[in-house]
């Protein structure tokens, strides 16, 4: 994997009518993780899918299932997501009044724990959970819809998070507006996992997806602060 850059295609941009087949195609195309954008129509204005759908498609890939819970009350269904087969559960700091408790529960369920930050949320809210999380997800768009434009000021936040975690083995993931043009910017700031939806699920099937993944990966690797 070039400079350890992780590419996590978001199935939000896939054909939901062929979701299992789309996951197979993007897996064969070279995806490292499968990113699952879970929306509840409350924390964000859109509605996607939950544990039953994830469980139904889990057998489509052996890759890491990376669940991003854009929901108002993530604690209520953590066990169901773990049972559905996800490997990483990322919750929003804004939705968790007892963030330490939520992170601890995710680990108890045998999953890696991530914390997501909306564009307006300062990274200092992570200070007292950095010793127990595995991933920080910096939103580079406002959550709730695919295909949005990248918010360029979020590169500063990525750099701040990178400085906060120091040498800790915490993945910095970015989600929103990631394309071949923006991949290098976020990688240079410190991101090591890139979520991309519409930039990957373009074209017709595995060959097209592979080309899109490779373009994003190579651009990110070229600028990666980790590989520098």
Image (cartoon, rainbow, N blue to C red):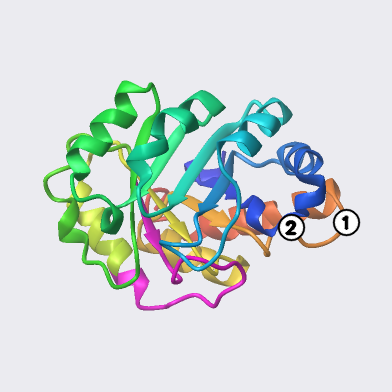
Does 198 appear above or below 205? below
| Residue 20 relative to residue 135: left or right | right
* Residues at marks 2 and 1, CA–CA distance in whole angstroms: 8 Å
Q: Observer-nearest residue: 113 or 101?
A: 101
**The residue stretch that appears in magenta:** 135-156
For the residue pair 22 and 47, the one nearer the viewer reads as: 47
Position of residue 110 measured from the top left corner of the image (x, y, whole percent): 38, 21
Residue 98 position within the rendered picture, expressed as x and y whole percent measured from the top left: 18, 44
Residue 113 against residue 109 in the figure, above or below: below
Residue at the left extreme of this rendering: 128
Identify the secondary structure beneath mark 1: loop
Q: Is residue 93 left or right of residue 197?
A: left
On residue 78, the disc is: none
Q: Residue at x 70, y 25 (%)?
A: 59
Q: Is residue 112 magenta?
A: no
- Name the magenta segment's main secondary structure: loop
Count residues near mark 2 (Cα–Cα under 10 Å), then give few for <14, some for 14-19, many for 20+: many
Horizontal relation, residue 122 to residue 151: left or right: left
Please identify the quadrant where the N terminus is shown: top right
Q: Residue at x 30, y 55 (%)?
A: 95
Name the residue: 76% across, 49% down. 210
Q: What residue is disc 2 on?
A: 201
> Can you tell which quarter of the image residue 100 is in?
top left
Residue 227 is at least partly visible in this image: yes
Residue at horizontal 27%, vertical 54%? 93
- 79 displayed left or right of 37: left
Q: Secondary structure at mark 2?
A: loop
Q: Is residue 145 magenta?
A: yes
Is residue 130 shown to the viewer in this render? no
Q: Pointer 1: what residue?
A: 204
| Residue 223 in the image: above or below residue 30 | below
């Amino acid at each position: 994997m070039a400079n350890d850059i992780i590419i996590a295609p978001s199935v939000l941009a896939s054909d939901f009518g062929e979701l299992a087949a789309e996951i197979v195609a993007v897996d064969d195309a070279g995806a490292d993780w499968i990113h699952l954008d879970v929306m509840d129509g409350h924390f964000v204005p859109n509605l996607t899918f939950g544990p039953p759908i994830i469980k139904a498609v889990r057998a489509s890939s052996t890759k890491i299932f990376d669940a991003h819970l854009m929901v108002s009350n993530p604690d209520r269904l953590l066990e169901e997501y773990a049972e559905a087969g996800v490997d990483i559960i990322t919750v929003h700091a804004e939705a968790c009044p007892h963030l330490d408790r939520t992170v601890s529960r995710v680990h108890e369920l045998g999953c890696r724990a991530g914390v997501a930050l909306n564009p307006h949320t300062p990274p200092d809210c992570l200070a007292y959970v950095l010793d127990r999380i595995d991933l920080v997800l910096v939103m580079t768009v406002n959550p709730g819809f695919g295909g949005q434009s990248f918010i360029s000021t979020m590169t500063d936040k990525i750099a701040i998070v990178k400085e906060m975690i120091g040498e800790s083995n915490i993945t910095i993931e970015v989600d929103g507006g990631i394309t071949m043009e923006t991949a290098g910017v976020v990688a240079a700031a410190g991101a090591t996992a890139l979520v991309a939806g519409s930039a990957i699920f373009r074209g017709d099937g595995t060959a097209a997806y592979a080309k899109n993944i490779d373009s994003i990966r190579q651009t990110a690797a070229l600028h990666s602060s980790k590989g520098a």
